[in-house]
Each structure stands twice: as structure tokens, then as C-alpha cells.
Image (cartoon, helix red, strand yellow):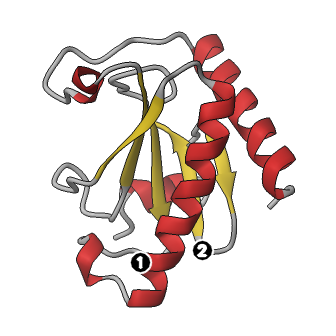
Amino acid sequence: MPTIFSRIANGEIPSYRIASDDSYYAFLDINPVAPGHTLVIPRKENDYIFDLSDADYAGLALFAKKVAKALEAAVPCKRIGVAVMGLEVPHTHIHLIPIQKESDMNFFREKLTLSPEEMSGIAAKAEAAFNEMYGNK
């Protein structure tokens, strides 16, 4: 049975897409810890990031770097924080979080509730920045 992330990447479940290509997909987390909190996944299902092949691991990291640069351009922040935990969904994923300070990476605080309009606006800005930087992929 496909994971929820596979279903999102395949368009079966709606998402706020930031970027995608044949191998990777980036979309806004619907339970963000900060505005612009994005998940980057490989399209190929794999539960644990360190079980990825070297090529898939490197590809995911490079794709996440491009998404992070687009997020920096779209969401006011000092940096983009990176976290990989992978216990909540059995599908490898990288969290990219626009931060002002280290405590913005606190996954245990109450999650934000952003309106669909806010989510769409962030996604549109980030996707436009990604496309401007790297082409429409």
C-alpha cells in the first residue's frame, strides 16, 4: 500500500507543491512549525534515509538544497533549518524550516494553523523562486 507521501507526490492527495521532478517532490507541511515548513521526499518509497542508495541520497540532498534556496527567497528568514527524523511517516523525508532562531526548530511546540490562502501564497512564491532559479522542472 502506498504511503501518504507517495499518494501526495502522485497527485492522489492535494498538496501545496513547491517543486518536483521525476525523482523528488517538495511540498508544504500541513502541520508546520513555521511558515514555509516544507517536506522533501524521494518519489521512490523508502522508510529510512540511510537505506537509500548513495545516488538517491545525494540526489535527495541536492534537490533539498535547491528547494531550501527557493524557500530563502520566498519566506523571510535568517536560515533554512534542516531535520531528518522519519518516525511519523514510513517514507524518507527531509524537513526544511525557515528559521529566525534555533528554537524555531522545536517540533514539540504547538503547530501553526495557516489558512489555505496563506499556504497557497507561500507555495506560489517558493515555486516561482524555484522555477526562476532552476527552471520549470
- N-terminal of the pair, mark 1 or mark 2, is 2
Which quarter of the picture shows residue 73? top right
State the image coordinates of residue 90 (x, y, percent, origin top left).
24, 62
- Label ID, residue 26: none
State the image coordinates of residue 85 (x, y, percent, origin top left).
20, 53
Q: Residue at x 55, y 43 (%)?
A: 27
Instruction: Compute the Cα span from label 1 to label 2.
Output: 11 Å
Q: Quadrant of the N terminus?
A: bottom left
Q: Residues within 10 Å of mark 1 (few under 14, many from 20)?
A: some
Name above or below for residue 71 compared with residue 75: below
Q: Which residue is mark 1?
A: 57
Q: Which residue is mark 2?
A: 23
State the image coordinates of residue 21 (x, y, percent, origin top left).
69, 66
Name above or below for residue 109 compared with residue 27: above
Q: Residue at x 58, y 18 (%)?
A: 76
Indicate the secondary structure of the residue bearing disc 1: helix
Q: Quadrant of the C terminus?
A: bottom right
